[in-house]
Image: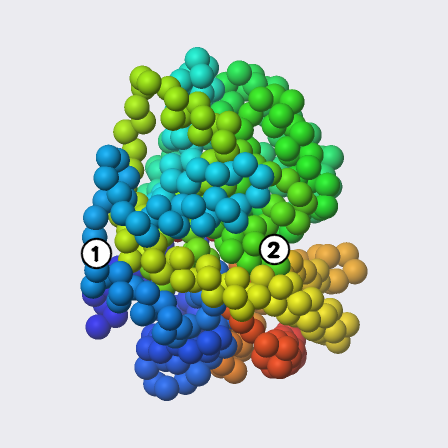
Amino acid sequence: DKNHFIHPTSSIKEQQEAGPKCIFEEGNGIYLKDIDGKEYIDAMSSLWNVNIGHGRKELAQAAEEQMSKLAFSSAFSTFSHEPAIRLAKKIAGLTPGDLNAVFLTSGGSESNDSAFKLARHYWMISGKPERRKIISRKKAYHGVSAGATSATGIPEFWKMGGMLVPDFLHVETPYEIGTEEAINSIRKMIEQEGPETIAAFLAEPVQGAGGVIIPPDDYFRGVRKLCDEYGILFIADEVITGFGRTGKMFGLEHWDVVPDMMTFAKGVTSGYFPLGGVAVSDSIHDVLKEHSTGTLFHGFTYSGHPAASAVALKNIEIIENEGLVENAQKMGEELLKGFRQIKEQIDIVGDVRSIGLLGAVELVANPDTNKRFTPERKVAAKVIQALHDRGVICRAVTYDSTDIIAFAPPLIITREQVNDLVQTLHDAILEVRKTITI
Ligand code: PMP
């Protein structure tokens, strides 16, 4: 039956050869069960989604109630509906600073493409139509729609069908280089292209798909300053980091930095319904709404879908009522402690890190020099297989020279479950270690 299913990222043969295959049937809390009845810890929250865990009846009930009442209506234009309006207000109240206007979409890629259009539209009606270019970073992941894939900084995504649109530029990210060098790379790009041609700088507070890259503490303050210096808009992609994942409601709050726009998706509904959006600052919104000409024709059919909005509201209520942001912070510390112990015990473990429950373990041939395994000897995929055998789902990041295991368990995880996860990770890495010589 699986042969009827298209995997667009690689050939069927590659898919069959690559890693474990699993068809899930049920989810409960941090656990997933496959069609053979085997249980797994969902240590990736099903790709950074299920912040509140699987199987929450309250969300099913919220969807059911909304669908029985008003299943569908468009959320924007001259008509709208209550759930979308209430959700926009709720999110405006949660986002930092003056990010008080919210445009809703159905996912992360759409949110980023919407932010690019909003930024360009803002410049256009401000009398600066030449400000069109978007600067993002190497190792960034921003989605797969035309703009978002062009903003993505992992070249694998541009191969094959990944047609790039013009006016997207990529700069260095603070990974293996410090803040100064990373900021200088942005400055150099701005100077080279001409500041008057740049619309916005886009960044994930913590790069997720690129390998869980946590920036140095002063990096985003430097970014904010640089954007202000050149009058460039700063867009934060909080699709992974939003709604508690990092131990703050939004990732940038770790560094007290407020962007001009913030995109979100995934955690806003914990993945129970497709929904995303862009929160926009008052100063941008004022320009957008007061301009009487130059309408931006933009909006998706399912922008702010009623049931998705109702589910998002219930999801946010649960995150707040159950103190899941605080739990992510506390359990993140526990997880990192566990990673550090494993690093002490097994010699192929390099850098380990976690910010809240967004963590990574790097695998290296020599931890003292940080020397990586050669491409054909990389080990992350083997560790993922060993974890899978032991009932843990997480993700290998193995593009270019990276050899990383990424973690993002649901924010409801308990101390006992974190310890169980860490012990299983230890056993899996040790098993793989025994099969290799270095
Ligand atoms: N931005 C980031 C940071 C992401 O991680 C993702 C999805 N992994 C996206 C955007 C794209 O979101 P979607 O898949 O919902 O289009």
Q: Position of residue 417 (x, y in %)?
A: 58, 79
Q: Quadrant of residue 244?
A: bottom right
Q: Helix, strand or loop at disc 2?
A: loop
Mark 2, Cα crowd under 10 Å, few <14 / some 14-19 / many 20+, is many
Q: Nearer the viewer, residue 345 or 335?
A: 335
Q: Quadrant of residue 337?
A: bottom right
Q: Is residue 143 above or below residue 62?
A: above
* Residue 428 in view in this figure: no
Mark 1, Cα crowd under 10 Å, few <14 / some 14-19 / many 20+, is few
Q: Is residue 49 above or below residue 117?
A: below
- At 46% from the left and 40% from the top, the residue drawn is 279
- Which-is-in-front pick, marks 1 and 2? 1
Compare marks 1 and 2 and give the one earlier in the sequence.
1
Q: Given the image, on which type of amino acid does mark 2 rest?
A: Lys
Find the residue positioned furthest to the bottom.
Answer: 37
Instruction: From the image, tell me which residue sits under label 2.
Output: 248
* Residue 87 in view in this figure: yes
Which disc, if any, is residue 70? 1
Residue labelled 1 has its Cβ within 8 Å of some atom of ligand 1: no
Residue labelled 2 has its Cβ within 8 Å of some atom of ligand 1: no
Q: Given the image, on which type of amino acid does mark 1 rest?
A: Leu
Q: Nearer the viewer, residue 176 or 355?
A: 355
Q: Helix, strand or loop at disc 1?
A: loop
For the residues marked 1 and 2, what is the alpha-carbon distance in whole angstroms? 33 Å
Q: Is residue 374 above or below residue 130?
A: below
- At 73% from the left and 35% from the top, the residue drawn is 180
Q: Position of residue 354 (x, y in %)?
A: 65, 61
- Which quarter of the rendered picture does the N terminus lie within? bottom left
Image side of residue 204 versus residue 37, left or right: right
Q: Position of residue 266 (x, y in %)?
A: 43, 56
Find the residue positioned furthest to the top.
Answer: 127
